[in-house]
Amino acid sequence: MSELDLDPRLPLIQNADLEGKIVLVRVDHNVVKKGDIRDPYRIDATLGTLYNIVERGGRIILMTHIGRTRDKMTGRITVDDDTSVQPVVDYLERKLHTKFAVPQFPVHPEWGIREIDTSINWLIRDLRAHRIGAVYLPNTRWFEGEESTGEKRERFTVQLAGLADVFINDAFGSWQPHVSTLDITRHLPSFAGFLLQRELINLKRVLEPDRPFVAVVAGAKYDTKIGPLYQIYKKVDHLILGGVIYNTFLCAKHDIHVAGVGDTDVKAAKDLVKLDEKAMKVVELPFLVESDTIDGRVEGKYRTRSITEFRKGDSYGYFLDVPPESFDAPGVADVIGSAKTIFVNAVMGLTPHFYEGSEKLDRTIDQNRQAQKFYGGGDTLQEFKNLSPGLYLAAMDSAQYYFFTGGGTVLKAIEEGTPYGLEPVKALMENGGRDPRH
C-alpha cells in the first residue's frame, strides 16, 4: 500500500500531530446482532490505527454506530442492549489487555441521549493519566443529534468536538453523512486512518480493474441495487447475478413468474435485459433450485430447474439457490477462470438451508490463481467464513484477496464512479488536516 495511490488532498494520520493529544476515532464496529458479535473482522481491521495512535503518544476516544435505532416514521430512538457497544468493548478488552470505559449519560425514553454531560470529564482525566486505556462512547445513533438537523445536530457536533484535539476517520463502512462522520471535521483537525486509506486504495483497483473484469452481485431486493447495478454493468466485462436480483432478471427476460418477485421490480429489470441484448455481459447461471416454501429445505418440496425449460407465462415457486453444477457449466466456468479482477458482493442462496451455490461460487473463484479477488459486505464475508472456514482463513492471508469492511460503501462508490465522492471522505479532503479552530 502506498500513499502515492491516494488523492494528495486527503489528509493522512501519518501527518497528524498526536503526541499528548486526545484523539476522537470514528470506526465502523457495527458487528453486533442482538448483543452478540457475529464476526470481529471489522474490529480487527482497525487495530493498526489504534496501535499507531497510542504508540505516537495519543489517547483514544472511540465511537461507532450499531444497528438502526431510530424509527423513520416517528424519529424516536430505541436505546437497549441489542444495540449497545458493550460486546465490542468486552472483545477489545480481551484482545488488547487494557481497560475501556463507557460513559453513562441520561437517556430520554423517546429521544435517546440528548447531551454529552460533564461526567465524561472524569473519564478523560483518567484517560490522560493512563488509568484507563481508552474511552468508548455509547452507540452514536443513541444520540439525538447524530442524525438530526438544525440546532440539535449542531449542539451535538460542538459537544463531540469538545472532547478531543484531533479527529481520525477510520470508518469506511459508515458512508452516511452524520455528525460523527461528517460535521465533526468542521471543528477538529481531521485525518484518514490506515484502514480508510487501505479501503480507498483497493476501491480504486475495483474502479480501474485489470481486465477481464467479472462482478458477482446478489441481493434480497432488486430496487435497492438498481443504481449500483447499472454502474457495475457499465464497468464489467461479465456480470453474474444471484438471489432475488437474478430471479427478477430471469422474469424480465423470459417472461415468467417466480414467487417472491414483484411486478414493479420485473418492469424495472426490463431495462437491464434490453441493455444486455446488445452487450451480452450477463452470464446466465443455467440451473436453479426451486422450492415450494421459504421455511426451510423440506424433502420433496424442492428441485433443480434448468433455464432451458422456461416458457413464456410459466409460473414457478421460490428460486432459493443455484446448484453447484451451474458453476461447472462451460460458459460460467470459463468466465470466472479467465478473469483478472473479480468483485463479489453476493450470497447466492437463502441461507442457512440453501447454501451450496455460495460455497461453490467461492471455491470456483479460488481456483482462478491469476485474478485479484475483492469481496465486499458483511453478509458476503459471514457466509464465506461459515461455509468454507479453511478457505476463508487462507484467503485472509493471501495477497490475491481483499475483503472490504463495507459492501454498501463499495456499491455507493461504484455508483459515484470515485471513492472520493463519499460525503465523509469529501469532508476530510475539504478540511485538509488543518485546525479549523485557528
Image: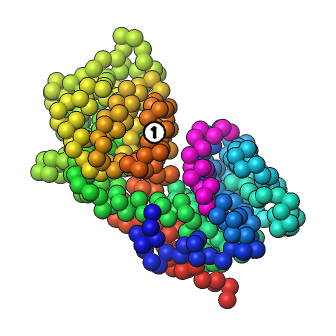
On the picture, is 213 further left or further right than 312?
Answer: right
Q: Is residue 426 magenta?
A: no
Return the x and y of residue 78 as percentages of the image width and height.
Answer: 69, 48
User: In front: 133, or 169?
Assistant: 133
Tell me what residue is drawn at x 49 percent, y 35 percent: 385
On the picture, is 395 further left or further right than 172?
Answer: left
Name the residue carrying label 1: 394
Q: Residues within 10 Å of mark 1 (few under 14, many from 20)?
A: few
On the picture, is 67 further left or further right than 362?
Answer: right
User: In front: 211, or 221?
Assistant: 211
Where is the N terminus found, in terms of image quarters?
bottom left
Tell me what residue is drawn at x 22 percent, y 52 percent: 212
User: In front: 82, or 342?
Assistant: 342
User: In front: 76, or 374?
Assistant: 374
Element type at mark 1 = helix
Return the x and y of residue 287 as percentages of the image width and height.
Answer: 24, 27
Tell me what residue is drawn at x 70 percent, y 46 percent: 95
Say whether residue 314 is visible.
no
Tell me what residue is drawn at x 24 percent, y 47 percent: 339
Placement of 351 over or under 77, stated as above or below: above
Say whether residue 388 is visible.
yes
Q: Quadrant of residue 111?
A: bottom right
Q: Which residue is situated farthest in the top direction here?
A: 300
Placement of 204 over or under 74, stated as above or below: below
Identity, as a three-letter code, of the amino acid under mark 1: Ala
Return the x and y of residue 409 as percentages of the image width and height.
Answer: 46, 56
Magenta stretch bounds: 35-50
Return the x and y of residue 421 as percentages of the image width and height.
Answer: 42, 69
